[in-house]
Image (cartoon, rainbow, N blue to C red):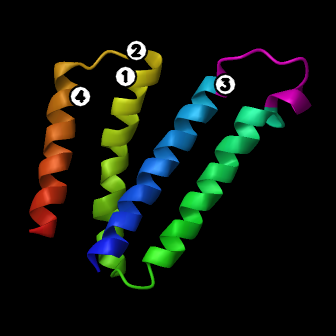
């Protein structure tokens, strides 16, 4: 079952990566509304998100549904860290404390 829990975490990380790609695409100017929604970064991000959903479905065959909210909480950590990495977003003291609380909650749940 540990393998399938790891798959869930991988799925959450992949979803966070697709959010970063969408945010990068949102910061660009496009010639038309069509081009704004049908371009390589946006289509890639949604494809990546679809892959994450497929991984979720595979993992859910073996992992109790009660684990999902706990694993999904780690997405906040991934998004904050990826935002810092790709967008140079500021990591405030509040964000660090929040990330620590989420991380501790996930660890305690799985002990």
Where is residue 103? Give x, y as percent: 18, 48
Which residue shows up at 60% across the image and 53% down it? Answer: 49
Where is residue 31? Give x, y as percent: 90, 17
Q: Earlier in the sequence, mark 1 or mark 3?
A: 3
Would you say the residues marked 1 and 3 are in contact, meaning their CB atoms lie under 8 Å apart?
no
Above or below residue 106? Residue 4 is: below
Number of other residues with Cα within 10 Å of mark 1, as a class: few under 14, some 14 to 19, many 20 or more = few
Would you say the residues marked 3 and 2 are in contact, meaning their CB atoms lie under 8 Å apart?
no
Residue identified by numbered label 2: 88
- Label placed on residue 84: 1
Would you say the residues marked 2 and 1 are in contact, meaning their CB atoms lie under 8 Å apart?
yes
Above or below residue 29? Residue 67 is: below
Which residue shows up at 31% across the image and 53% down it? Answer: 73
- Label placed on residue 95: 4
Q: Would you say 5 lies left or right of 36 here? A: left
SS label for mark 4: helix
SS label for mark 1: helix
Number of other residues with Cα within 10 Å of mark 4, as a class: few under 14, some 14 to 19, many 20 or more = some
Q: Earlier in the sequence, mark 1 or mark 4?
A: 1
Q: CA distance from mark 4 to mark 3?
A: 23 Å
Q: Which residues are magenta?
A: 25-36
Where is residue 59? Give x, y as percent: 44, 75
Number of other residues with Cα within 10 Å of mark 2, as a class: few under 14, some 14 to 19, many 20 or more = few
Q: CA distance from mark 4 to mark 2?
A: 14 Å
Which residue shows up at 38% across the image and 84% down it? Answer: 62
**Image quadrant in which the N terminus is located:** bottom left
Number of other residues with Cα within 10 Å of mark 3, as a class: few under 14, some 14 to 19, many 20 or more = some
Residue identified by numbered label 3: 26
């Amino acid at each position: 079952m540990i393998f399938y829990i790891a798959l869930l975490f991988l799925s959450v990380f992949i979803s966070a990566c697709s959010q970063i790609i969408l945010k990068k695409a949102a910061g660009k100017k496009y010639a038309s509304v069509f081009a704004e929604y049908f371009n390589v970064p946006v289509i890639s991000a949604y494809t990546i998100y679809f892959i994450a959903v497929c991984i979720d479905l595979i993992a859910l065959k073996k992992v109790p549904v009660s684990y999902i909210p706990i694993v999904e909480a780690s997405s906040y950590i991934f998004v904050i860290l990826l935002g810092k990495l790709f967008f140079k977003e500021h990591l405030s003291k509040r964000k660090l404390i929040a990330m620590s609380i989420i991380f501790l909650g996930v660890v305690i749940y799985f002990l």
